[in-house]
Amino acid sequence: MSDWLWIAGMIAVESVLQARSRTVQVIYTTHDRFDSRLARINRLAREQSVAVEAHDATTLSAVTGDGHGGIVAQVGPRTLSSLDDLAQGDAPVLFMLDGVEDPFNFGQAVRSLYAAGIDGLVVRRRNWLTAGAAVRASAGATEFMPTAEAESPEAAAEALRARGLRVAVAAEDGQPMNEVDLTGPLLLVIGGEKRGVTRSFQRAADVRVRVPYGRPFAHALGTTGAATVLAFEVMRQRVSGSVGQ
């Protein structure tokens, strides 16, 4: 299978097993590594008929590089949902991360979205779900977050509008986030640091939203920062039941 990849770290490996988000081929761990988390991993591996093999640290470094934390796993592609699946439920709020060019930034952003209770993630078909670094940077959140693919923001917007979702985009000239109802049903698109979201898509969005700054600042937040702030504004509005407070 050509799209197997190696992931490293206790949290990442345990998350893949807990979420059952990928096929796990084999787990390597160092001979001297044993603790309560590894005991849980061994139990989950037995339940899923996954082999756990003891190797020295050099063998683990050869497949993932240094910093593996004493455990690595060879896993298959991420199992994905459909856009239809993500659009189900009571007023879902979905985020699309488009054009993120670093797997660490992608993983950190997904970690924030998951922590804030965002209902689902939309990604392009070429994305960082195939990078072990993203799984680790997200502390395993990439494996638990309901995720679907779309060819482009335009394709995602068309499909989800047909299911009753508004389409919002993060833009520097948008309304302050605390003045926009972000409680759903909603697709919020955030562009990457370099390419951003196209002007044509921004014009076609139902609403443009921005993160207000506390002082004049010439440089916008990066994707990870913007995703985090917007996601927790969604959570705040859901908890308080109000906009603008």
Image: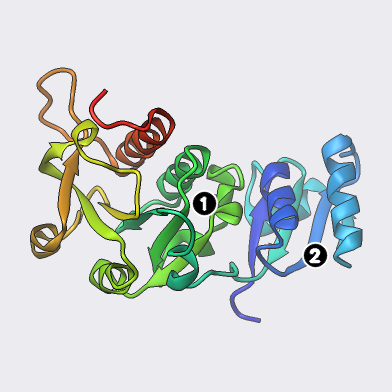
Which residue is drawn at the image coordinates 23% and 31% (left, top)? Answer: 178
Given residues 107 and 69, the one toward you in this image is 107
Q: Quadrant of the C terminus?
A: top left
Residue type of the residue flagged with mark 2: Val
Q: Earlier in the sequence, mark 1 or mark 2?
A: 2
**Residue 104, label in figure:** none
Kind of residue at disc 1? Ala
Dividing the picture into quadrants, the one containing residue 227 is top left
Q: Secondary structure at mark 2?
A: strand
Which residue extends farthest top?
215
Determine which quarter of the picture holds residue 199. Answer: bottom left
In this orientation, which residue lies closer to the viewer: 77 or 200? Answer: 200
Quadrant the N terminus occupies: bottom right
Instruction: Write down the residue under mark 1.
Output: 134
> 124 or 87: nearer the eye?
87
Question: Crowding at label 2, few (<14), some or many (≥20) Cα neighbours within 10 Å?
Answer: some
* Residue 55 appears in the rendering: no
Q: Residue at x 53, y 69 (%)?
A: 81
Q: Is residue 175 left or right of 144 when viewed as pictured?
A: left
Residue 177 percent location from the top left of the image: 22, 35
Whether residue 103 appears in this view of the structure is yes
Residue 116: give x, y in percent of width and height.
Answer: 47, 38
Q: Please give the residue where the numbered disc 2 appears in the rendered image.
A: 26
Residue 9, x across and y down, in percent: 69, 45
Badge 1 crowding class, 10 Å Cα cut-off, few under 14, some 14 to 19, many 20 or more, is many
